[in-house]
Amino acid sequence: MAARCGGLRVEAYADAVNRDLWDQEAEAFDSEPDHGLTEPSARAAWRDLLLSVLPTAPARVADLGCGTGTLTRVLTDEGYRVDGVDSSPEMIKRARAKVPESRFVIADAATPPLPEDEFDVVLCRHVLWAMSEPADALRQWVALLKPGGIVVLIEGHWATGAGLTAAQTAQIVLQVRNEVHVRHLPEPIYWGKEITDERYLAISHR
């Protein structure tokens, strides 16, 4: 039997706590240079990076753990059709205001309530590391893809000790997919500062 805390299952309690934490973060979330991408040079760098690995627009993208919708906005401006999922109502509120032409759903990114076999791309930014069962979550994400669809993961192993190394992410992806390519992203333009930790893009085509 699942453990309970204050009448809630532990998993449900943890989800509620995390949702509340992200709701509290939402107001200031875009003030981080790599979150809001308010600097034109940073925005252009992320746009160019994503366009270099994505199929051409108007491919359909599932932006899982979309936060305030910054990457959804970048891709929608380039002609992509993007559906966003995030568990935080406050994040989704801001995403809907930022990208009114896209569809957003309040839900756990681990089990996104999106149609299977309909997306060309699954895009997740700093989400895999937070999953309690990352390989299981990735299987759920892959199920959303059409044949030939790609997975794009933006992840890191940060100076705080949180996150996943590129080797760990590659190992998780290879439990579910046949291949993965890692591109390290040490350039300050992506983060608004010099970094000394590990940040990277992991792409899987099959």
Image (cartoon, grey):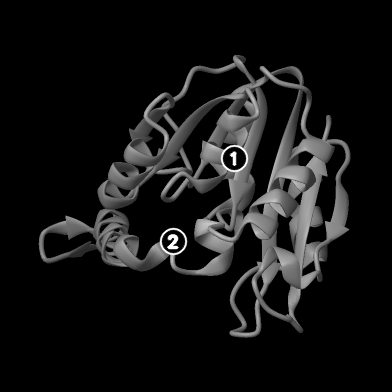
Mark seen at residue 56 = none
Q: Secondary structure at mark 2?
A: loop
Left or right relative to 149: residue 104: left
> x%, y% of residue 180?
86, 45
In contact (CB < 8 Å): disc 1 and disc 2? no
Quick check: 16 above or below 47? below
Please tell me which residue lies in front, 140 or 155. Answer: 155
Most foreground residue, 181 or 90: 90
The disc at residue 74 is 1
- Nearest the eye: 91 or 87: 91
What residue sits right under mark 2 in the picture? 30
Report crowding for label 2: few under 14, some 14 to 19, many 20 or more residues within 10 A (C-alpha).
some
* 2 on left or right of 46: left
Q: Is residue 115 visible?
A: yes
- Assess disc 1: are there few (<14), some (14-19) or many (≥20) residues with their C-alpha within 10 Å of its C-alpha: some
Residue 117 location, x and y as percent?
62, 15
